[in-house]
Amino acid sequence: MELTLAMAIGMVIGAIVLAMLNQQIAFLQIFRAQSFLNEEAPLVSTHVSKLLMNAERFRLHASLNEALAGQNATLAASPVLVLNYRQPDGTVRAGILSFEAGPQGQGLYYYVVPDSGVLATPEWAVTTRPTNVTFSVVSGILRCRLTGPAGEEIIFSGAMQ
Amino acid sequence: MKMKTSNYCNRNQNAASRQKRGYVSLLVVFTIAIFMLSMLLFAYQRAINSQSVQADIQAQTDYREKEETILRSIVAITPNRAILAMQDGSFSDQNQETNPLSFRNIFSDALAQANARQSISDDLRAQLAIPNSFSGNTGDSALDNLDLMFQSEDNNDGFVTGGLNRDLGVAFPPALDSNNIIVADDLFPIIAKAKKYGNRANGQVGLPTATYSDFNVIPYPDINFGYAQPGQNFVAKRNWWAFSMNLAESDNHLTSLARFRRDFVLSIYEIPSQLPISASSYMALGAHADGSAWQNVTISGNVFAGRAVVEGNTALPTLATRRGATLSANSTIGGQSFTGNPFAPGVRETFRLTQGDFFPISLASESGKAAFISINRGVDYFDRYAHTAEANTVSQTTWNEYSVGALQCAMRLDITQCTSVSDRKPTELQFSYMRNGTRQVLVLPQDQGAATNLEAGYIYAAPEGSSVNFDTPVDVAYGAGGSYFYRSGVSGTVLFSNDNFGNPIVGTAKNGYFRPRFPFEVKNLPNGKICVAVYPERFAIFMNLIGADSLAVNNSLAINVDYVNSANLTKPLIPSTGTDYGVILQECADLTSFTKGFSLVTNLRLYIGDDFNDVATTPPTGYTPPNGAAFYPPTSLFAPEKRYGADLDPLAVEFSGRVGSVASETAATPIRPLDTTTVSGISMSGSQTSMNLSTIRHPAELPPIFMMNWLIVLEEKRSEFY
């Protein structure tokens, strides 16, 4: 009787422990899956917001080539964002945010357009974790939509100066 | 005993057995506990990491947002302080820590205005009746170390580095020069005429600075407000100050947050009014007061208004306003019809994609870190006597001197006496002018000359025994004490002596006098209104006769009434009444003798009685008018009311140039800038007028006197483009 009771209690405890373990693992899996929103997206937001807020003008394009050629600018969701920066002496430089298959894989890359206008390697990879990044202009507000590895989405909005 | 022993042994065995099972249980419990604790710690660590990332991001975002708001506050505060720095007594406190006009205090006030220190002020708490509440905003900070947050670019004593007499290198604008070293420019926002384009800017601005030092041709900044198009050359002078900012620096000991210093250039562009229609006024565009549409109107360039209502089928090239515009359904701006609100979000962006980069209608408030101020003193602009002297100013240029057209004129003609309060006939005029850089005053009694019983109009020439050479015929007189000998139409060298004239009064020292052909006189309109008639074509000879500086210096005339020093004279009313004086402009077709142009400013009603400035002249060296157009001396006429004709109503008026106004932009009723009125007070119809309005594109086209605007822009100087 005592043994039976002990075994039963042991089995209940074991089952609870297993359930808790399972729950913990599930929780960690969810946590890991959502870490893009918690940890990566805010950093991306910081960088992208900084780039946007410093720009005097921006344009959206479907590809890097069109961006460099200044052709087919659009307001619709696009993977390439051209940012113009004017210095106080009147000189203008441009930067490009592009979601593409770059040196570190699919990711959001930033280029500084050189005076020659010919792009080399990206200045840096802003993030390689999202599965998709698009820019669009809605009611004059620039929106950046990031789709995470688990399909989660986050949208940043901003305006030029 | 055995049993006992046996029992004892069994108990020992059972005890040993229980001890072994206990170890296992302990181990299992301990293992599970460690495992769960590890899981818990791991999750906790992840949460801590996530919270830490969020906290850093939040702090960065908070500082960035604060910086943006502070920068906008700096743009709003600085021009007002620059104006105050030109006003009386502004330099009585020369300490930048206590003088509110210093950059140090501009930055400090910007922190307060942006609520950067305290998100909810004590005043606001009191208004909300929650004085004992506490703020949960962890971003509140004392931000009390201005020296760390704001720094000059060259470690001077101030908080900024002025773009004056020094080059700061690549990416900074061309610096201004000043022969009068303005040390305070690093401490205060100084706008002064002494700041000019010199050798440092030569080659970096559009025109040679040796010729065009006051204003030059520079590119318009990249802002949405469309006084000009971004990058387009316009006529202006750019004052600027550079500084760096890192708001987090003051809290670094608390946050250890890594933030880069950001470099900024704060500019105040001085922009002479140069648009076809430009006024910080409430304006109705497109129709006359009688409701008829504009006819024969050509506008080449942008239009600026304080506030505007565009009527009928009007087509304007562009429209920039400070307080917005109301557009009729059929009007177009830049060829674009705006059925809805042109300032609605997204309209500009869509237009840029489909129509071009320059959006033709804009508001000053649409540009983030930019502000546009039209220097508009209202009717005081016309009146020298409405102002008191200013002294001890931070800027070497006082505010009145800078912003009042009548005070800027080289020549001044005042009605200083009249017969009585009821009889307004002027009995004395006073004319002042520049000679060798010094102001000279000529008192002209209207009932007699410069001496007792000398005929009116005669002015002093020389003492007895002296010779004076007159290039052009004048009347001369010789004598004293009411006894004079006269000769008319004399030119060449005249010896004022008894041998030459005879002796009009024996035993008394005598003087020589002459009466030139005056370029002004008291004259009545046909309706009896008392006026001062001005004849600009006569000035060249007259000024030469009285030994004045050339008309390149004496190029502007202010006509006022001295109601301050005369008991019989009163301040002219606007609109002019029947007892107020007027000004008649005649003999004014050929102004080529005014080699730097001609301006007239008066607070009296102006009657333009003849063709005005329709004789072309040779343009200045280095300037070719666009499209092979003829060059006319640049001129400006400033008066509260203008009427066309002096003796008769004209049949038609042709006008070329620019139109402005000093009316308020908050007035209830809009002004109509192209309405014209004849001498008899009849409004001319649109078919009787022809208006060709164009933009000034070169400083050689600037008249001596013009209205001024300020464009304040704050730009970041980037060491990297991200």
Image: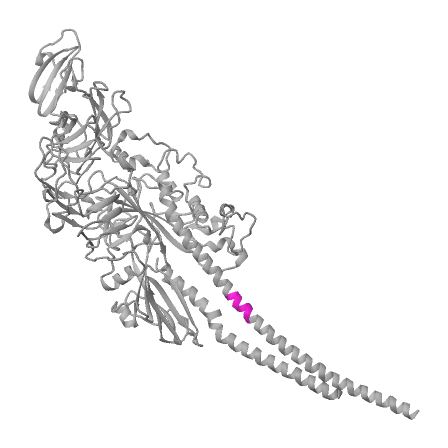
B45 horizontally vs B209: left or right: right
- Name the residue nearer the viewer: B494 or B529: B529
Observer-nearest of A155 and B288: B288
In the depicted view, which residue is nearer to us: B175 or B357?
B357
Evaluate whether residue B258 shows in this view: no
Q: Is residue B58 visible?
A: yes
Where is residue B225 shown, x and y percent of the image?
28, 52
Is the stretch drawn in magenta largely helix, strand or loop?
helix
Q: Is residue B254 above or below residue B42?
A: above
Which span of residues is magenta-colored? Answer: B46-53
- Residue B170 lies in what quarter of the image? bottom left
Identify the residue at image location x=19%, y=46%. B276
Q: Is residue A44 left or right of residue A84?
A: right
Residue A125 appears in which quarter of the rendering? bottom left
Q: Name which residue lies at 18% across and 21% down.
A: B425
**Residue B461 in picture, x, y percent from top left:** 16, 20
- Image x and y of residue B137, in percent: 52, 56
* Magenta stretch: includes residue B48: yes
Quadrant for the C terminus of chain B in the image:
bottom left
Q: Examine the rendered structure and indicate whether residue B240 appears above or below residue B518.
A: below
